[in-house]
Image (cartoon, rainbow, N blue to C red):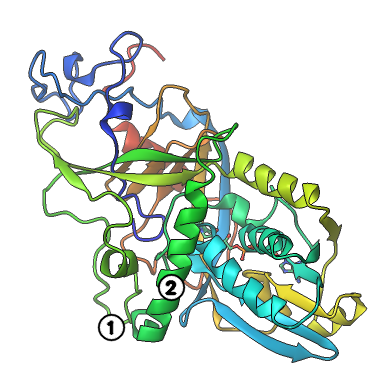
Amino acid sequence: MAGERVDAMMGRRNLLVGAGASLMLAGCAGSADGGRKPMVPEGARDALRLTPIRATPDRITRITVCTRPFRAQGPRLEVERIGQKLVVHHYGHGGSGWSLSWGTGLVATEKAMALGERDIAVIGCGAIGLTTALQLQRAGAKVTIYAKDLPPDTRSSFATGVWSPDSRICLEQYATPEFKALWARMCLTSFQSYQNLLGLPGTPIEWVDNYFVADQANRERHEAVTDGRPPFADALQHELLPTLTPHAAEVPAGLHPFGSRYVRRNTNMVFNISSYARLLLDEFHANGGRIEVQEFHTPADFARLTQKVLVNCTGYGARALMGDTSVMPVRGQLARMIPQDDVHYGLFYDGVSFVPRRDGFVFQVIGPDDYYGYGDDSIEPDRPLAEQAVRTIAGLFPPPAFG
Ligand SMILES: Cc1cc2nc3c(=O)[nH]c(=O)nc-3n(C[C@H](O)[C@H](O)[C@H](O)COP(=O)(O)OP(=O)(O)OC[C@H]3O[C@@H](n4cnc5c(N)ncnc54)[C@H](O)[C@@H]3O)c2cc1C
């Protein structure tokens, strides 16, 4: 999935679930494609076995909605003098905020540190504010975060949680050579930062295999935009950093449990946002950082801060705070579900993505293209849509033997 792109493939290790407690779909009475003959040959050594997901609407624990802070021209990364303050703007990361945060944070940190002050305010405590604050500390600054909302109540807390560095990050027409060079640098920085966060207690970050499942082989996750609107630059990683993550590979029918369907596997990073945000907060505090809950209604309110240099990481909030209408909302809804310890693979099927987050499974209707939810700032949960997402994924598995 572009952005929260599920083109994730994986290492066989996680695929070959032990046959004991887990169900070998190939051997089930009801096959996954609605009664057709099971496709996995008896005893096939390399057959893919996946523990079925207990995807039933009654297991939904929460439905969350948030707005991606999209800017057609990409994230705003520039310095502005506002009254007596020097403000480094650092907002507008669309559907890529978690993924690119360490890379864009490094650029913002360089700009802030170049202003010569060592006592710095960060406005905002989402993915961008937290990672920027840590990078400023690592660069030697004393940092105070000021924010209206803190995790787990920031918009960042309601993200899917996958590596998606080119999701709704800019429109194709703004992907100039300069932007592409900057994006590639930010993407690489972030990617490497995430490799240092693997294997930690609480599993904040992990690699997970994902299966793109389709009824026809030529089916893609997203349709091209055909109504005249400019397309999103959603293939930057493929174009600029094609070897960064493992390539997708088809899993032949007969070696997967989804009947005659087309199946492609890839491997992608998952961010277990609860433990990851906790890790970031803990490090920030351990480095002597302070957090104050404060709301700013206009840029003039910055005058009340003691710091001369501020980094503005207000995300979608920048639209109202700065009067910046270049920040457009792109609505996205997640259905969260009780996790299962034995399910560590992702799925994409029929316009729905499933991410096996350890802090709660995620089911999401992705929509036909990246304009899905564009311009929609509503945040009311849509329960029927959440149930549709769950039922779509459930359709890949035989009905449970007991309720
Ligand atoms: C459904 C959905 C799924 C997504 N999935 C992914 C994904 O899988 N991978 C990925 O990389 N990205 C994903 N994203 C995108 C990602 O969540 C955003 O890019 C990211 O959260 C932006 O972070 P932020 O810190 O800029 O904004 P926020 O999380 O909104 O943080 C802004 C902070 O600023 C504060 N603030 C705002 N205005 C004010 C004010 N006036 N005064 C004081 N404080 C203020 C807020 O309280 C908050 O602390 C997804 C987004 C959505 C909506």
Quadrant of residue 19 within the rendered picture: top left
Residue 151 x/y as whole percent = 70, 50
| The one of 238 and 363 positioned closer to us in this rendering | 238
Residue at (14%, 23%) from the top-left corner? 35
Q: Is residue 150 above or below residue 112?
A: above
Q: Is residue 364 above or below residue 357?
A: below
Residue 236 visible at all: yes
Q: The disc labelled 2 sits on which kind of residue? A: Trp
Quadrant of residue 260 within the rendered picture: top left
Sort mark 2 into few (<14), some (14-19) or many (20+) by Cα contacts within 10 Å.
many
Residue 221 x/y as whole percent = 26, 55
Sort mark 1 into few (<14), some (14-19) or many (20+) by Cα contacts within 10 Å.
few
Query: How many labels, in total?
Result: 2
**Left or right relative to 34: residue 196:** right
Q: Is residue 56 above or below residue 144?
A: above
Q: Are marks 2 and 1 in contact (CB under 8 Å)?
A: no
Q: Which mark is residue 228?
A: 1
Residue 146 x/y as whole percent = 81, 64
Quadrant of residue 242 within the rendered picture: bottom left
| The one of 336 and 312 positioned closer to us in this rendering | 312
Q: Of the residues under marks 2 and 1, which one precedes in the sequence?
A: 2
Residue at (28%, 83%) from the top-left corner? 228
Residue denoted by label 2: 183
Residue at (14%, 38%) from the top-left corner? 261
Mark 2, secondary structure of its residue: helix
* Front: mark 2 or 1: 2
Q: Quadrant of ligand 1?
A: bottom right
**Left or right relative to 390: residue 59:** right
> Quadrant location of the C terminus?
top left
